[in-house]
Structures are given as structure tokens and as C-alpha cells.
Amino acid sequence: MSPVRRGPGRPIHNRIGVLRVERGMTRAGLARAVAVNPQTIGALERGDHYPSLDLAMRICDVFGLPVEAVFSRTPFEPLSTQVYG
């Protein structure tokens, strides 16, 4: 499965890296869990590519979170700001 190139006018922001590290997962481990190449996970985390709907849903299933908790059209507020104000 080839990731879709990110569009300049409509970026998709994600928390994949934060969630992966929080759960003690490597890129390779997450890649195995969602059946992609580890380089795909790296490209998603860097924002070089964004996932297909199917891949986004598989990633969300691994984390046990809804899509809007992992992906957004607007930048995410840092978690420390959300938790500590």
C-alpha cells in the first residue's frame, strides 16, 4: 500500500509518534500491527505523507482511539497544554 502525498493546502496533522512512544511501541512494531513498511510510519509521523482511510482506521484500532483523537485538519494543541492548562 502506497501512502498518499500530503496536499499543501489541506494538511493532515497526527499524533502517531506521541501515541506510539507513549505505548512503548517502535515504528517497526506499529508497522507490523497495521501491515505496512516501517518507513511508512516514519513518513506519516514526519508529515511527509498522510494515510488512506483504511490505514488511518487500522492505526486508530491499534491505539484504541477514534480517528479525531489521532488525526486532524488543524494542528493539535500540545498534550501538556491540554492536561496542565
Image: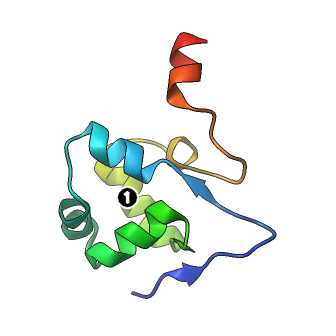
Quarter containing the C terminus = top right
**Quarter of the figure with residue 77:** top right
Seen at 36% across and 68% down, the residue is 41
Q: Position of residue 15 (x, y in %)?
A: 48, 47
Q: Position of residue 56 (x, y in %)?
A: 47, 63
The colour scheme is rainbow
Seen at 53% across and 69% down, the residue is 53
Q: Residue 50, relative to residue 64: is it above or below?
A: below
Answer with left or right where residue 4 lies relative to residue 26. right
Q: Residue 41, relative to residue 76: is it above or below?
A: below
Q: Residue 76, relative to residue 46: is it above or below?
A: above
> Mark 1, residues whose alpha carbon is within 10 Å: few (<14), some, or many (≥20)?
many
**Quarter of the figure with residue 34:** bottom left
**Quarter of the figure with residue 32:** bottom left
Q: Residue furthest right?
A: 9
Q: Which residue is mark 1?
A: 59
Q: Position of residue 60 (x, y in %)?
A: 40, 52
Seen at 55% across and 65% down, the residue is 47
Answer with left or right where residue 60 lies relative to residue 7. left
Quarter containing the N terminus = bottom left
Q: Nearer the viewer, residue 55 or 82?
A: 82
Q: Position of residue 31 (x, y in %)?
A: 26, 68
Seen at 52% across and 74% down, the residue is 52
Q: Residue 17, relative to residue 49: is it above or below?
A: above
SS class of the residue under badge 1? Answer: helix
- Give the number of callouts: 1
Q: Amino acid at mark 1?
A: Ile
Q: Residue furthest bottom?
A: 2
